[in-house]
Amino acid sequence: MIYNTFSIPATADRYLVISQKQELLDIIEQGTLQNSPFFILGGGSNIVFTDHYHGTILHLENKGINLLSENPETGDILIQAAAGENWDTFVQYCIANHWHGAENLTAIPGTVGASPVQNVGAYGVEAKDIIHSVQAIDTTTGQERTFLNDECQFGYRSSIFKKKYGNQYVVWSVTFRLQSTYKPDIRYKALSEALTTAGIDNPTPRQLSDTIATLRWSKLPRPEETGSAGSFFKNPIVTTDHYNQLKSCYPDIVAYPVPDGFKLAAGWLIEHAGWKGRSLGRCGVYHKQALVLVNLGGCTGNEVVALADAITADVQKLFGVTLEKEAIII
Ligand SMILES: Cc1cc2nc3c(=O)[nH]c(=O)nc-3n(C[C@H](O)[C@H](O)[C@H](O)COP(=O)(O)OP(=O)(O)OC[C@H]3O[C@@H](n4cnc5c(N)ncnc54)[C@H](O)[C@@H]3O)c2cc1C
């Protein structure tokens, strides 16, 4: 069985499936995690294995989605989902139960547990917009700790769990604040255009979710068909001066203003560095979206890294912009 969406075979010294909290607490108590490296694995949809993993893989498989409370005055609904739940199963469950707010995050691969770690986002919404709190277990002590939303230090595909704590905390469950009143968020340009094209003015939650799924898979490779880790690079942020210089040379450059400058579309930079559709070894740049690196068949993690490095060097040389990997290399 291959537990990563890049479909790269990998092995580890130990592979432990955790479905009960006590199993995790026993592993911590035995000192297994103190004596050698370990990696917390969800759905493996944002990682690239380059070698045998000399340590323990903790694969979260705990399940459960529970309604905690419903406030008829504010319309707030608190739902707790276990880390091992598939993310899209959770989103679809919410839609079926008329709990609103997660629709735009339809069909993101991976698990509920990774959603706060990565602060997943799509079509104008990020996990941070709907997370109330995160229940986590400290792997150094076995103690449970709840992080409220504003303690999670959410950023662009990042959080306190990724930055400050590395993998010190296992996210055990996540509590989401959803709404009983449905207010579709269709501000994202490509989404509003897709709805208009489909002749839908006021999408129902089902229509919104379906439109997003169709849009997503028209641009990204489906993991069951083509191996990838989704967007391989982050969209880089540059100063306003740097952006203005680039804009004068490349008037059609795609960028969005952000508080500390401009966020550039990494896909545009990679495409204009000539990499769209090209390959190195058995790893390629997806022909529909240059931000995605794909397994062309039998590709190794080192081939992925070699292609990523070649792209990064060309983008640096041409635009003076340093690309940062979104995918995690192990
Ligand atoms: C085709 C495709 C499309 C994608 N589209 C998007 C998108 O639109 N938006 C987006 O944001 N991402 C996207 N991604 C990336 C990916 O779906 C997300 O990063 C997702 O959150 C990863 O979840 P996972 O369970 O697979 O995590 P993994 O890949 O298994 O792990 C990712 C990181 O999270 C940590 N982690 C996982 N579970 C836990 C836990 N329970 N406790 C603590 N740490 C944990 C891991 O240690 C690792 O650091 C896409 C990926 C693919 C393959």
Image: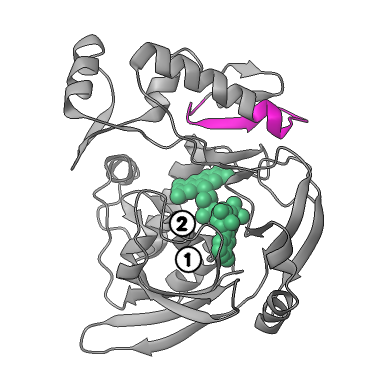
Quarter holding residue 280: top right
Q: Nearer the viewer, residue 75 or 113?
A: 113
Describe the element under mark 1 as helix, strand or loop: helix
Dot 1 alpha-carbon crowd within 10 angstroms: few under 14, some 14 to 19, many 20 or more: many
Q: In the image, which residues are magenta?
A: 288-304
Amino acid tagged 2: Thr
The structure residue drawn at horizontal position 35% and vertical position 58%, both measured from the top left corner, is 154
Front one among 281 and 55: 55
Q: Residue 107 in magenta? A: no
What percent of the width, then of the height, locates residue 117? 47, 59
The residue pinned by badge 1 equals 91
| Vertical relation: 316 (above or below) 54 | above
Residue 204, horizontal then vertical, whole percent: 34, 63
Please give the name of the residue rendered at 63% of the width and 23% of the height, measured from the top-left corner: 306
Marks 1 & 2, CB-CB < 8 Å contact = yes
Q: Nearer the viewer, residue 59 or 45?
A: 59
Relative depth, front residue between 40 and 217: 40
Numbered label attached to residue 106? 2
For label 2, the SS is loop
Where residue 166 appears, as percent x and y from the top left, is 52, 57
In the image, taking residue 262 as reference, residue 130 lies left or right, namely right
